[in-house]
Amino acid sequence: MPLFDRDTSIFSDEDVLREDYQPESIQERDEEIDTYMASLQPVINGAQPRNLFLYGKAGVGKTAVTRYLLSHLERDVDAYDDVALTVVWLNCNNLSSSYQVAANLVNELRPPSQQISTTGYPRQTVFDMLYTELESIGGTVLIVLDEIDHIGDDDGILYELPRARANGYLSSVKPGIIGISNDLSFHDSLSPKVKDTLCEEEVHFPPYTAGELRSILEQRAENALYETAYETNVLSLCAALAAQDTGSARQALDLLYKAGDITRAADETTIRESHVRDAQQALERGQIRQGMMELTRHGHLALAAVLSIAISDETPARVREIYPEYSAIAERFGTKPLVRRRMHDHLSDLAMQGILKRYARNHGRSGGQYYEYDLDVTLELALDVVDELEDVDISLEAVRGAKLRGLR
Ligand SMILES: Nc1ncnc2c1ncn2[C@@H]1O[C@H](COP(=O)(O)OP(=O)(O)OP(=O)(O)O)[C@@H](O)[C@H]1O
């Protein structure tokens, strides 16, 4: 008897639920697609492309829609002899300057044997190399810069590249930039010059509603799961949970995939609501674990302080109550405590990551505001995760100690 055998009851093609799967059609984004297509129209007309800025939170379809439209555009330009389109994708994660973006673009355009070092050249040299590469391609070149917000303040390339033709650096190529960002504040932080150029056209992708997520899930489930693999309300539940939390299609798809996994692991043949709820907990745990793993030492210490206060049932707690606990734990583990304000920065970061919850309170008549913090996840979950993090940071030992005290 084989050790492994094929899945015959849950997944007919589980790859369809994976992150990198490109759906053949896009659901529920008609308005955004209309605006997007209008912005791409000059390309098929053989004109200079417009620059485009797409923004919206994670998982709301920016990449999926871009891939879908650009693959159609690449196919459709074939019908016109006078348009040659090249699409270049660059993820700007970890690229924090125009120089780095330009150098990485050069490498995207060059064969592996002619790659350049991404440091050490004068800025203009790298830009000149980029212009040379673009000229050698010719035609229309659409440059998709995903996670463009990583470029930060050093955003000159977003102005210079689209203007390169007008400024005489390029002649045989028509470049256009498609910038994608899930940092909603990036748009406001752009300099007016860059904003005018890059944001010539803008498409905002709002979070999905439960109904929209349901139709995205229906389309995927049809190809990914056997017809009898799930109870009817399962898709609605995944859609509702994701809509209440983030409005992200990625989250909804992850929930369904995980629920299928849990069902399969339990040797059952039908995904039910309880599997979705278990999946939600498992994913949440995974996220918290990831968030905790990535904390700095002082992040761990600040979290340890809140956890130990939560164990004594004294949360929400004010910063001035958390600070002595934090300092005591830090000293116990041989780390010099930060000043209160800096520890507070760590508490804010933990709140941003969804590990802590922050409440702004007002001092009665005297005015002024102060903050209180509490766990944003159940104490049980946080402690379980901490228990699993055997090798993380010694500071979390403090929490284990507190846990034992609490149990006594
Ligand atoms: N309208 C849609 N129709 C079908 N599938 C979709 C739709 N929107 C999103 N998806 C799917 O959801 C997942 C996440 O979408 P996508 O990667 O496009 O999000 P994003 O907005 O680019 O997120 P991020 O900013 O994190 O990169 C992908 O698997 C994608 O195929």
Image (cartoon, rainbow, N blue to C red):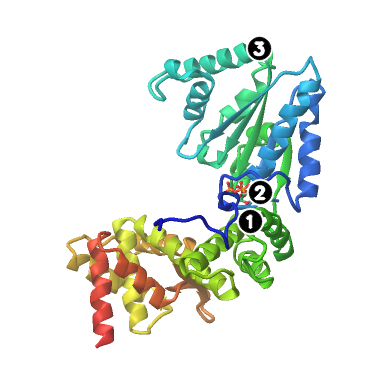
| Residue depicted at 48% across the width and 24% down the height | 103
| Disc 2: which residue | 61
Q: Residues within 10 Å of mark 1 (few under 14, many from 20)?
A: many
| Residue depicted at 71% across the width and 28% down the height | 74
Beta carbon at label 2 within 8 Å of ligand 1: yes
Q: Secondary structure at mark 2?
A: loop
Amino acid type, mark 2: Gly
Q: Nearer the viewer, residue 158 or 370?
A: 158
Q: Is residue 125 left or right of residue 385?
A: right
Quarter of the view holding residue 383: bottom left
Residue 54: % across, % down:
67, 42
| Disc 1: which residue | 249
Amino acid type, mark 3: Gly
Proximity of marks 2 and 1: CB atoms separated by less than 8 Å:
yes
Disc 3 and disc 1: Cα gap in Å? Answer: 43 Å
Q: Which numbered tag is attached to residue 402?
A: none
Residue 252: % across, % down:
61, 60
Q: Secondary structure at mark 3?
A: loop
Quarter of the view holding residue 169: top right
Q: Which numbered tag is attached to residue 168?
A: 3
Quarter of the view holding residue 328: bottom left
Residue 58 seen in the figure: no
